[in-house]
Image: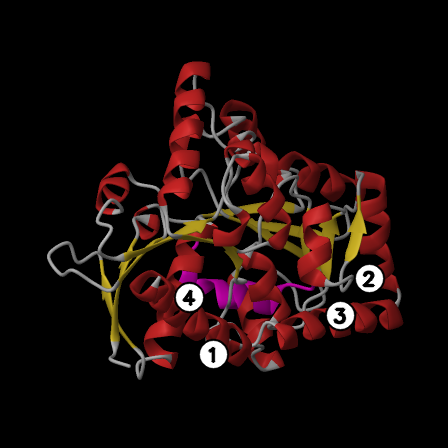
Amino acid sequence: MKKLSITMYSSADKVAGQGVGSAYKEQVRLVKEGASDLFDVRINDWKHRSDIQHFHTVDPQFFVKMHDHRCVNIAYCHFLPDTLEGSLQLPGVAFTVFSKYVVQFYKSADRLVVVNPSFIDDLVAYGIDRKKIYYIPNFVSKEQFYLKPMEQRNQIRQKYGFQANDFIVFDAGQVQTRKGVLDFVEVAKKCPDYQFVWAGGFSFGKITDGYEELKEVQAHPPKNVHFLGIVPREDMVDLYNMADVLFMPSYNELFPMTILEAVNLSIPLVLRDLDLYKDILFDHYLRGNDNDTFAKILKNLHDEPSIYRSAQADSQAISDYYSKEHVLDMWRKFYVDAYKEKKYK
């Protein structure tokens, strides 16, 4: 078969500090580097007609482009209208219109890719054909996110103002209501001897849900809570290297890139007990639903070396499953099958 041309369409990297942008960059790099024998990959090339068009974001201009039915049109589902609640504050009419638009965007694709299988039933409920929905997980390169030698890790801690023996509880993501920022701060108050670090900011400015309250918390945090703001992706590996635990009290996710980044360094996971994690993390994480439970889990990790080592092993198991080879094989097969299906049906 001839080498297939794929054009990736995305505006995700125009807004700093959001997981969709990280997922987009990782997926493009994976396919370009690992499947160059099968695919010629272009980025936002409006002049070239490709065999496959892969839309990573739901921009209106991409919706117009998707109506070129001579190409195979693939859409990424990184969110549902329901998941926007708690993320953005939009007037009722605007939210309704945007929700309908997103569903229509997904319906217009030949194939839809989800990063978490738990969302397939939700998409079907929106009237999308189950047969055209495919699950392919996110991926994070172990060459970019890796454990550094202890000496370097201590130097990183010193750079950010921490001691070598500090117990650092870390999270990364946009500062918004659904991410559980307020819970993160409340748990920090219950654990005054630990240091809590949040990397991320208001990527969407004042339309961020809970902006005023969160802005106040960010401006006047407890003394053991540190908001670093939006950190360039190339610097994130240092933050994971100074972290002892990834604590994500988020109320709504798909497949957080933060988790995949952390498990590459075998960092223990403490997460809210969300159904959507069950199919993708395979019980390899510690969980809770209230701040007292979260505080207790963190204390156990700090005080009991055997519990900490077990949690590290769980994270390593997740990292091993989402290997480069496994996810790359899925993309190679997916694109070829999608092309054959449309060309020969």
- Badge 3 crowding class, 10 Å Cα cut-off, few under 14, some 14 to 19, many 20 or more, is many
- Badge 4 crowding class, 10 Å Cα cut-off, few under 14, some 14 to 19, many 20 or more, is some
Query: In whole angstroms, how far apart are the C-alphas of marks 3 and 2?
Result: 17 Å
* Residue drawn where x is 49% and y is 47% of the image: 200
- Residue 232 visible somewhere in the drawing: no
Q: Which numbered marker is on residue 143? A: 1
Determine whether the residue tagged by mark 3 lies in a helix, strand or loop. Answer: helix
Q: Work out whether residue 196 or residue 80 is closer to the camera in this orientation and state it.
A: 80
First of labels 4, 3 by sequence position: 4
* Residue drawn where x is 48% and y is 48% of the image: 78
First of labels 3, 2 by sequence position: 2
What kind of residue is marked 1? Glu
- Answer with the quarter of the image where residue 336 lies: bottom left
What kind of residue is marked 3? Asp
The picture places residue 267, in percent across and down from the top left corner, at 68, 67
Q: Is residue 20 above or below residue 81?
A: below
* Residue drawn where x is 56% and y is 58% of the image: 258
Placement of the C terminus among the 4 image quadrants: bottom left
Placement of the N terminus among the 4 image quadrants: bottom left
| Location of mark 3 (residue) | 314
First of labels 4, 1 by sequence position: 4
Camera-nearest label, 2 or 1: 1
Query: In whole angstroms, how far apart are the C-alphas of marks 4 and 1?
Result: 11 Å
| Location of mark 2 (residue) | 302
| Location of mark 4 (residue) | 26
